[in-house]
Image (cartoon, helix red, strand yellow):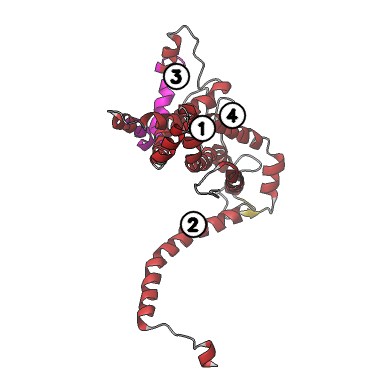
Amino acid sequence: MSQRTGRLRLPTGNQRREWFAAYAFLTPQLLGLVVFIGIPLAASIYYTFTKWDLIAPEPTWIGLRNWEYLLFEDPRVGKVLLNTVKFILTGTTSFLVLSLLVALLLSRKAKGNFVFRALFVLPWVLSSVALGTTWKWLLNTRSGPLTQAVELFGIKSPDWLLDPQWAMIAIAMATTWQALGYGMTVYLAGLQGISDELYDAAKVDGANGWHRFRYVTFPMLSPTTFFLTVTSLIAAFQLYDAVVTMTSGGVAVAPGGPKDSTRTIVLYLYNQMFQYSERMSGLGYAATIAWMLAILIFIVTIIQWRLGRLWVFYGGDDGR
């Protein structure tokens, strides 16, 4: 029996030492995951079933009441979701398109390209709060440089941050300008990975510049576009810094204004966390909004992965 099936091999001394060393190196990371991620996640799930204003000594168990109010009764949830969709349509779309255009322009071999690349990347490494404050000054209705530049052409400048129709567009302009260097860098990396042989073959077949972009560049960049689409949508759902810095501080405009036209899901979460006077607010309701946001991001990401099979090309015969 032992010769046919073999004996159970016990670990040798060297293997035990290797395992001990591996567990010793992994233990700090695992403890960090449990303490700083696992326990907070479990606690946040528990708080979604409670009501707690952080003043009472302990939370009050209310079951599914937070979820019922969030999904079926809260009139502001639809508004903040619509604001997020508006930002995605303006900010995320402009970010992807402009990042690709700038990358195509700066991918050409020309003197001084590295200077322009550095200038585009610079806003990405700066503080979001500082950039939001700067754009708030640029878009000032009375004295903003951008407002005055528009009016030099005899055109009445919009009330960028005071008009509900323009406020989210203004925020999208600021966030696109900041993230453009990041998107450009990722696209440049993708462009450098495209073989020159593909372009040479397309030229032999008589393809012009547009055809080479349509049938060579864009398909080969589809994994890069897919990556930027997924990550930028996740970032769009978590929009917060730019909204707070650009729409707060004035007498007539509160964070998320005007008229809640720029209040996003994360800002609404923050508001409800500290609005103890409302019927459903506090830590429990804020945790419920956070989990709704997490579930929404997960669903949208899964949909993108499913749709990505239809247009993302990874190379090779199968490629998808």
Amino acid tagged 4: Asp
Q: Residue at x 49, y 25 (%)?
A: 170
Give the image location of residue 39, x and y in percent.
Answer: 51, 59
Q: Is residue 133 magenta?
A: yes
Q: In this picture, which residue range is highlighted in magenta?
A: 119-145
Q: Measure how far apart labels 1 and 3 are at the Cα level.
A: 41 Å
Of residue 88 and residue 114, the one placed in the foreground of this image is 114
Numbered disc in front, either 1 or 3: 1
Q: Residue at x 58, y 40 (%)?
A: 272
Secondary structure mostly seen in magenta is helix
User: Farthest residue toward the left?
Assistant: 111
Give the image location of residue 229, x and y in percent.
Answer: 52, 39
Amino acid tagged 1: Arg
Q: Secondary structure at mark 4?
A: loop
Give the image location of residue 143, x and y in percent.
Answer: 41, 15
Residue holding disc 4:
260
Q: Is residue 255 visible?
A: no
Mark 4 / mark 1, whichever is N-terminal:
1
The label shown at residue 214 is 1
Residue holding disc 2:
37
Q: Is residue 129 magenta?
A: yes
Q: Eyeballing the image, is 30 above or below 100?
A: below
Give the image location of residue 124, x and y in percent.
Answer: 38, 36
